[in-house]
Image (cartoon, helix red, strand yellow):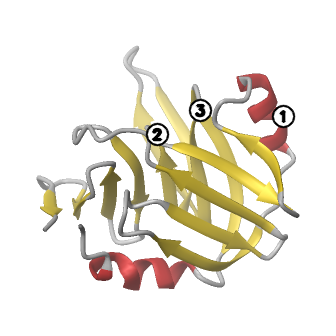
Amino acid sequence: MVDVADIQSDLTSLVGRDAWRVSRIHGSMFFLEIGEKRKSSYRRRDGTIRHYDHGEWHFMFNMVQWRFERDDQVVVACEDEQETIDQVFGGMILGLIKRISISPVGLDLKIDFDAQMSLKTFSNSGRQEWDQWTLYCPDDRYWSANGQNVLATGHSSEPRTEFSE
């Protein structure tokens, strides 16, 4: 099992912050933008530069099962059609983060928003090399979790440090 205490301070820092955009990247992978908007850019393979607004905090959910729920109903989930995901994400209003918790089993997340919506993630693999989600922090740090209960952290310019028991 993983000691999740190392990430708890950063997760607690998200409570009360605005979750202002959910956007699908590829397949069912998506970003959840939180906090103040910050300009970001990256160079594409073709050499062009793409500009993008990220939250000062943002999650990238990739190799993980997920669903958004409201009133004990599934609003949208990872196995829905991509067009459905895009449509729901485009109109989604989440508001402030009320609670966030992490499970020591699978490092699954539950995020409750004040718009009566919840996001839940579920491990879908025990393969260590598959990151389930990554939390990017304002100071260029990140936390990344995978299904084998390995929590990695570091700065984007440094090698990863893994915490597991």
**Front tag of 3 and 1:** 3
Look at 72% across and 29% down and name the residue there: 80
Residue 62's label in the rendered image is: 2
The residue where tag 1 is placed is 87
Q: Are the residues tagged 3 and 1 within 8 Å (C-beta)?
A: no
Q: Determine if residue 2 is in view.
A: yes
Q: Determine if residue 56 is in view.
A: no
For the residue labelled by badge 3, is the local secondary structure a helix, a strand or a loop?
loop
With 52 as the anchor, is 151 left or right in this view?
left
Q: Is residue 150 above or below residue 5?
A: above
Q: Distance from label 3 to label 1 (Cα)?
A: 13 Å
Q: Is residue 149 above or below residue 163?
A: above
The percent coordinates of residue 61 (x first, y second) are: 50, 46
Q: Distance from label 2 to label 3 (Cα)?
A: 7 Å
Residue 51, image quadrant: top right
Q: Residues within 10 Å of mark 3 (few under 14, many from 20)?
A: many
The amino acid type found where label 3 is placed reads Ser
Camera-side residue of 138 and 3: 3
Q: Residues within 10 Å of mark 1 (few under 14, many from 20)?
A: few
Task: First in sequence, mark 3 or 1: give its number.
Answer: 3
Camera-side residue of 93 and 105: 105
With 143 as the anchor, is 90 left or right in this view?
right
Task: First in sequence, mark 2 or 1: give its number.
Answer: 2
The amino acid type found where label 2 is placed reads Asn
The percent coordinates of residue 151 (x first, y second) are: 26, 61
Look at 42% across and 70% down and name the residue there: 138
The percent coordinates of residue 107 (x first, y second) are: 39, 61
Look at 23% across and 67% down and name the residue there: 1
With 90 as the anchor, is 4 left or right in this view?
left
The residue where tag 3 is placed is 28
